[in-house]
Image (cartoon, rainbow, N blue to C red):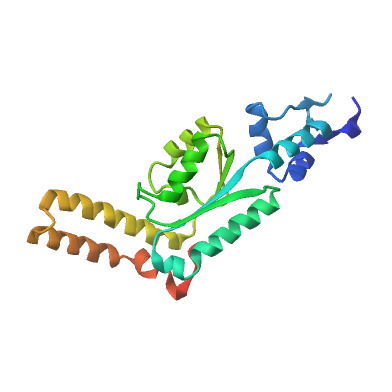
């Protein structure tokens, strides 16, 4: 074995712009072939790394960014989210072919930009979607969307694993929407009982410490 033609998992990961954990996952999925040294170290041929680099540059990569409110969009949160995703793509060697961005609740099932993205996946015109957090794609049911996209050969890549605490404000607003819908069904939109129940729930949730402090000092909820 000519060792100079083979790379350690750390060097291969650095060249590919991913983590060693990603390399191990790719190996299990059959996306990259490994070779074992006499001491049982994982090694990857330079040719294999170049092949993966070539595949990645040919991928159709898209960005999906979303904020819930008009205020977030006006404050520039959506644009900053897009810029962070574009920078991530550049740092990892991705060439972005299209950007999807919209202002809509994470529980809204009628998002035009998301529908267009899913249509492209069905037509096998994209291979990778970059999002900041799972709930940018969907507040509930993210795993179903991820599985659907995977079934069409599309990888969902989450650039940030942990959301900032202030993003809980958006979750509260989504929960209020769900409560309002179900309360309306139970009590009737025009009934006095419904109005009292809805007002009580909103007051209780808005009075919470997390909601009261969220977005303090005009802080961007997606640093």
Query: Is residue 153 shown left or right of residue 186?
Result: right
Decide which of 1, 99 is in the foreground and name it.
99
**Residue 218 at least partly seen:** yes
**Residue 48 x %, y %:** 78, 31
Query: Is residue 99 shown left or right of residue 175?
Result: right
Decide which of 115, 47 is in the foreground and name it.
115
Residue located 59% across and 61% down the image: 83
Decide which of 6, 116 is in the foreground and name it.
116
Above or below: residue 205 compared with residue 43: below
Query: Is residue 202 shown left or right of residue 80?
Result: left
Decide which of 86, 201 is in the foreground and name it.
86
**Residue 223 at least partly seen:** no
Residue located 22% across and 52% down the image: 181
**Residue 97 x %, y %:** 62, 48
**Residue 81 x %, y %:** 54, 60
**Residue 223 x %, y %:** 54, 63
Residue that protrudes farthest toward the bottom in the picture: 217
| Residue 60 sits in quarter | top right
Above or below: residue 136 compared with residue 35: below
Residue located 71% across and 36% down the image: 55
């Amino acid at each position: 074995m000519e060792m100079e033609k083979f790379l350690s998992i750390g060097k291969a990961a650095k060249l590919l712009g991913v983590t060693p954990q990603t390399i191990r996952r790719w190996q299990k999925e059959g996306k990259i072939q490994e070779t074992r040294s006499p001491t049982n170290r994982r090694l990857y041929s330079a040719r294999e790394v170049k092949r993966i680099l070539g595949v990645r540059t040919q991928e159709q990569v898209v960005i999906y960014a979303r904020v819930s409110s008009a205020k977030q969009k006006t404050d520039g949160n959506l644009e900053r989210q897009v810029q962070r995703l574009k920078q991530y793509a550049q740092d990892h060697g991705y060439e972005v072919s299209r950007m999807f961005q919209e202002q809509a609740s994470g529980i809204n099932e009628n998002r035009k930009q998301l529908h267009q993205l899913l249509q492209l996946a069905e037509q096998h015109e994209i291979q990778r979607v970059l999002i900041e957090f799972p709930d940018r794609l969907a507040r509930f049911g993210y795993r179903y969307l991820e599985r659907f996209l995977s079934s069409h050969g599309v990888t969902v890549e989450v650039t940030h694993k942990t959301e900032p605490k202030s993003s809980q404000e958006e979750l509260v607003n989504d929960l209020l929407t769900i409560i309002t819908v179900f309360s309306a069904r139970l009590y009737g939109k025009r009934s006095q009982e419904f109005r009292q129940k809805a007002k009580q729930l909103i007051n209780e949730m808005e009075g919470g410490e997390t909601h009261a402090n969220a977005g303090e000092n005009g802080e961007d909820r997606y640093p």
